[in-house]
Image: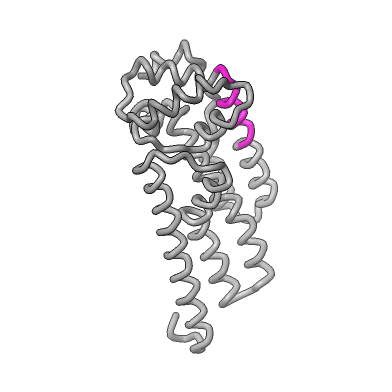
Amino acid sequence: KFKEHPDETRHKIVNSTIDMLCNLHLGQGNDIYWCEYGLCPTYQSYLNMIDGKTVSLFKCCAELCGIVGNKKIAKELSELYELIGRYMQQRDDYCNLTDPAYWKAKGFFEDLDEGKYGMLFLHYLDNKTVTDEEKTYVREHMLKGNVDIENKLKIYSMIYDSGSTQDCYNILENMRLEILDKLNNRSKTLSKVMDKLYLVQPIVPENVNTYL
């Protein structure tokens, strides 16, 4: 069907797809670069990375709808897809550190081993109730990598006790509810996807060992 469109439309489709692929690689590249060089991004830089790595693919779908279809609907989709993309990536980063199902599949606190600064770590390092000494302790272990289980459990407890774990849960849950509200049953498929992308309440530190 691509060949059925006029030349101008096909050029727009190709350009939109190329822009998406460039943004995707730039976002993924930033994520890898920060890990490789032990750099801690700002939360805004983290969101910009997500917009490239994850959101760009969603928004490209909406843009293509606008090129070949209804531009008004495409604009609405673009705003919704941006929210969904940001939720999915931040949720994935959060669940890597807090969800026993992720621990079983990937290992406990794997992002700490990789020095990967996701939503939860960034929130903790910006938490005003956390001392500089505590933040330095976490940063040093992220730089070191291959953290032993004892220190992982200690850092999990530090982050949990600071309130950052629950704060991030609340932020993500509000995002999820906002997405469902915007969907308003207009897409049964997307609604079913969002139903599956629920969040598990954070595990209290003293119970973590029962899941490992």
Residue 12 shown in magenta = no
Residue drawn at the location 42% of the way across and 47% of the way down: 31
Q: Main secondary structure of the magenta part?
A: helix
Viewer-proximal residue, 186 or 24?
Answer: 24
Any part of residue 193 in sight: no
**16 is higher (above) or lower (below) than 192:** below
Q: Which region of the structure is painted magenta?
A: 161-171
**21 is higher (above) or lower (below) than 178:** below
Viewer-proximal residue, 82 or 188?
Answer: 82
Residue drawn at the location 50% of the way across and 18% of the way down: 158
Query: Position of 23 compared to 188: left or right?
Result: left
Q: Quadrant of residue 104?
A: top left
Residue 163 shown in magenta = yes
Question: If the image is split into quadrants, where does the C terminus sit?
Answer: top left
Residue drawn at the location 43% of the way across and 58% of the way down: 26
Where does residue 53 sit, x and y in percent of width and height?
46, 54
Where does residue 88 sit, x and y in percent of width and height?
52, 45
Where does residue 33 sit, x and y in percent of width and height?
38, 48
**144 is higher (above) or lower (below) than 56:** above
Viewer-proximal residue, 158 or 178?
Answer: 158
**101 is higher (above) or lower (below) than 18:** above
Q: How is the image coloured?
A: one colour
Query: Position of 61 compared to 152: left or right?
Result: right
Any part of residue 199 in sight: yes
